[in-house]
Amino acid sequence: MYKQVTLESMGPGDAQAGIVSLSLPRESAHALRIVDVQNAFQPVGWWEKEKTPRRVLAFCMSENNLPETLHLEAGTPSLAGLPVSPWKLTARISREKLDYVAHKFANIEALRGVPANECTTVEYEILLEFGGRTMVLQAGSTGPKGGPYFWQNVQIDRLWRNAVVEAVRLGGVMYNEDTYLWTDWYVLLFANGVAQVTAHFVNTKLHIEGYDFQGLPLLRFAGEGLTARDAELPRDGLQFDLGLIRLNLRDAALLCSGAYPGRMQKIDADLLWYPVSRIFNPQPPEIPPTHWDAGFARTVRFQISFSEAPAAISRYRVPAWWYGHCGEPWSGGYLPVTGRFARLGALSSEWVQKEMVRGQFDGGSSGSGNDGYAGIGMMENFYHSGRADLFEDALAYCYYWADIAVDHRDFTIHQWIGGWPWKTCAYSKFRDLLCGYLETGDPYFRDAVENCAEAYWMWFRSNWPRCTIGRDAFEIGGWALLWRFLGTEHARERTLELTRMLRSVLDSRGMVGGQMGAGPHPGYLSALYMTGVCMLSLLEVAEAHSEASGLSPVERNRFIDDLRRLSEYFNRDDVGLFPSGWNEHRPNWVHSGYQIYQWSILGIGIYPKMARLLGMEGDEMVLLGLRRSCQGITGPFEDCVAKSRIGHNLVIPLIHDALMMGARVNMQGLELTPLAVPDQWPPKMTVHTPWGELSVECQWDGKQAQMRFESAGDFPVTINYHGKSFVTHSKAGIAAL
């Protein structure tokens, strides 16, 4: 199938360096490479840890503009390093003062605001050399007494190198005569002289509990031949020829605007770049203009060119069908389908995009659309649609979540519901961090997702044993995703132990509860939403388990038994959707918009997964649950977007449409195995195939189903339905089932 893959450039068109995050099928993960241009692969996800990659960053390079399309061929991809690196990267001390005034550490508050002349100071700068050009790079910040103050004790960590690019991580700490700010950079150095820099400024916990930080981040550029200039951003542009280098600040445009401009300042021969003009917290916005809460971070991205190549890096998109064929985001090789609910996912993505803050420090935040699934949800809608704006906004959201939602003191997570001070086990959502890592390879994402997952685990275990679980089980499924994509034994063990804990509650109570189970929130009561969350997480565990080693009959039956018990409760009409609404239920709650949308969105994901993962395609309970949840979304999708929590609306509709139809590639062409609820098949849908889009029209008269097919390409289509196979063609084919 790889011969049918076309990778399409999303621009910029003049780029001579490019990146694509490429999924690989298990059976040919070691035998594919890109045609036409120099390229190399760097694994970021694994079918089998350190043996069989399932996701790679494919880097490509050309002496001229990269082509609009790239293709795959059989062959061993390049993983080896450059024979001799054209880059030289060193850290040198720029200012050193080793004497200091001793302070009593027992008095913690007295350690804040110590003047610089009473402290040891060892400032560093980075020398970045290519093609006879040497540039000085330095991270810095302002402070209550002015500044700038530059990073100290910088360490260079060389990550990996292949035939196209090398990756380096470097970092140090800044003290601004008040408190501390950490700076961690991820730098990709292409062999043609183009560099991508992702600079993280992090108010982390260096000691004690962490302090607020008062100051603005900045970057210093210097070097012989640098033409420094004053500029206001974005008013004066975002791309600059500075003589020694060319600088592209387009990716940093999310953080500045006419109202809150960034600026470039010429000081002698040096250039200082201030990416933001003030700080914002998206929940309590009325904060002082230089105030970073403890745990706050912000990422600044930009490109540099030391050569004739433009300071630009092109991103390529992968066809939607290839993701499905490679087992993403659902397992089983089912191809994406634009069916009954795909538009709900698209509308939800557009709603998050419209809510996104742009042009200031907290760019990427989406107000009431903030969820922890919004980044990965928009990204998976990008996989489905190929829209470049969705990719950019999804990645921006992932960085927002990593920077501001995550508390970098202890890697707990601020939840949007309830306000800034609120953090709970249930809303410790970290999937957006995994999504960001798979798209960029940025170790900042990898560290954050693993640390947040551990914080979730510690929270769970510090309140164990207890007889409630409920929506605390949200990120049991998140751990299952880490197992699927990172392939570590640690993720497997954590996932299975969390699953055991959930099951122990289900076995002892016969239900799962709400959350903690005491105090003003009646968490002991088992509610339908919490039940659905547990069902989804169990299914994500089953998915990871089946991909890793397959489900034995005993394991499969245990999942089925768990889900049957939960499904019986999930379908009750005489209890509330949430524990906090326990006394608000009524027998016809399923006819009220808010409640039915919340319930139905979970259901349209749960029942197709039960059918496909556990071989329950003909199970009456599954088909009834599927029919009921489909029938619950009767109003306009715009109404559903407005009245339900956004996170599940983004991904579940895509999962539903794909698993409902069960389209896969076989040796002859395309094979469809639709679930046996023809009254819920969409009248029209589109299957994304290796040979182009296949239009399908469905009819059901109460006795017989009929499918009509149309496509620009001509290929066999086999339909499996009720134990029989029907064969037709994609061009004007008809199958009476």
Image: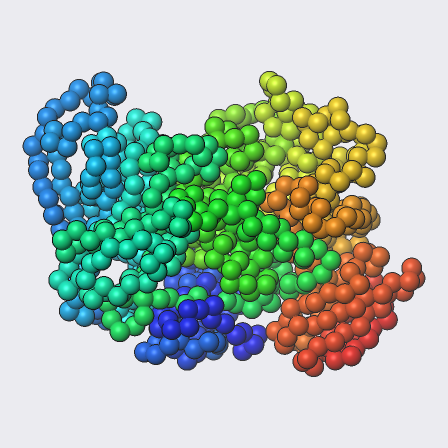
**Which image quarter: residue 149?**
top left
Can I make out residue 15 in this image?
Answer: yes
Total tally of numbered discs in the picture: 0
- Left or right placement of residue 511 versus residue 161 in this view: right
Relative image position of residue 690 (x, y in whole percent) = 61, 73
Can I make out residue 163 in this image?
Answer: no
Relative image position of residue 279 (x, y in whole percent) = 37, 39
Q: How is the image coloured?
A: rainbow
Q: Nearer the viewer, residue 461 or 355?
A: 355
- Left or right placement of residue 647 versus residue 271 in this view: right
Q: Residue at x 22, y 21 (%)?
A: 110
Q: Nearer the viewer, residue 677 or 113?
A: 113
Relative image position of residue 390 (x, y in whole percent) = 53, 58
Quarter of the rendering occupied by the C terminus: bottom right
Quarter of the rendering occupied by the N terminus: bottom right
**In the rendered view, would you say 410 is above or below 563?**
above
- Left or right placement of residue 367 versus residue 726 in this view: left
Q: Residue at x 46, y 76 (%)?
A: 68
Q: Nearer the viewer, residue 41 or 66?
A: 66
**Which image quarter: residue 549?**
bottom right
Q: Residue at x 66, y 46 (%)?
A: 641
**In the rendered view, would you say 120 is above or below 6?**
above
Relative image position of residue 319 (x, y in whole percent) = 56, 68
**In the rendered view, would you say 304 is above or below 154?**
below
- Left or right placement of residue 478 versus residue 300 in this view: right
**Which image quarter: residue 528?**
top right
Q: Residue at x 21, y 27 (%)?
A: 113
